[in-house]
Image (cartoon, helix red, strand yellow):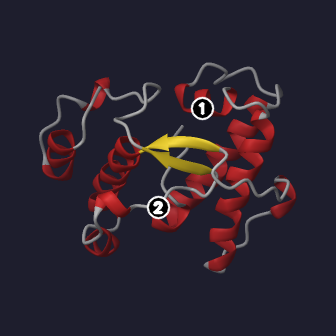
Amino acid sequence: MRLWSVHPKYLDYKGLVALWREGLLAKKVLSGCCKGYVNHPQLLRFKMYKKPVSLINAYLYQVYLEAERRGYKFNRAKVEPIILIGETTVTTGQLEFEFYHLLKKLEIRDRQYFEELKKLSPKNIEPNPVFRVIDGGIEKWEKIGRLRGRSKGVFAFMVSTVSIT
């Protein structure tokens, strides 16, 4: 499960659809309607919020808006259209880490989009609007252990650029 902190506009079609599906699963988990994934690290920041289901609804609504902007047909009835702007935080290091993680995925599955996105500065990547950006390294809930040993392409640059704490 990956609940991207980066704005959904950076995701390719496959990434946006996967985010929608995984976000809906996260909503079920946070609502207590699912027994699996209850301890998944990607859910921690939502669980720490005073109203986790409201936060995931607002998060998913931003994903829905991006899908609608692109002409995709996501089912709006699956989320409450709640707009929370900067209600919880994400660190600069987390956004950079996720941006490079996304580039690594795109390098394989959508080379043309990869070439477009790699021109962007990771320092200027926008978050999903429910997040307010603060200074800091990679979030403590991020699972990076399995990624540390890799040394190819974009990921090698990512590891050497973003502080892994």
Q: Is residue 165 left or right of residue 154?
A: right
Please give the count of numbered marks on the rendered protein. 2
Callout 2: helix, strand or loop?
loop
Residue count near mark 1 (Cα–Cα under 10 Å), binned few <14, some 14–19, many ≥20 = some
Identify residue type, mark 1: Arg
> Going 64% across and 70% down the picture, which residue do you hit?
67
Query: Is there any visible trace of residue 12 in the rendered image?
Result: no
Q: Earlier in the sequence, mark 2 or mark 1?
A: 1
> Going 33% across and 29% down the picture, which residue do you hit?
144
Callout 1: helix, strand or loop?
helix
Which quadrant: the C terminus?
A: top left
How far apart marks 2 and 1 lie (CA) works out to 18 Å
Quarter of the rendering containing residue 91: top left
Give x and y (percent) for residue 158.
21, 46
Q: Which mark is residue 90?
A: none
> Going 64% across and 78% down the picture, which residue do you hit?
69
- Residue behind mark 2: 126
Q: Which mark is residue 45?
A: 1
Give x and y (percent) for residue 74.
73, 65
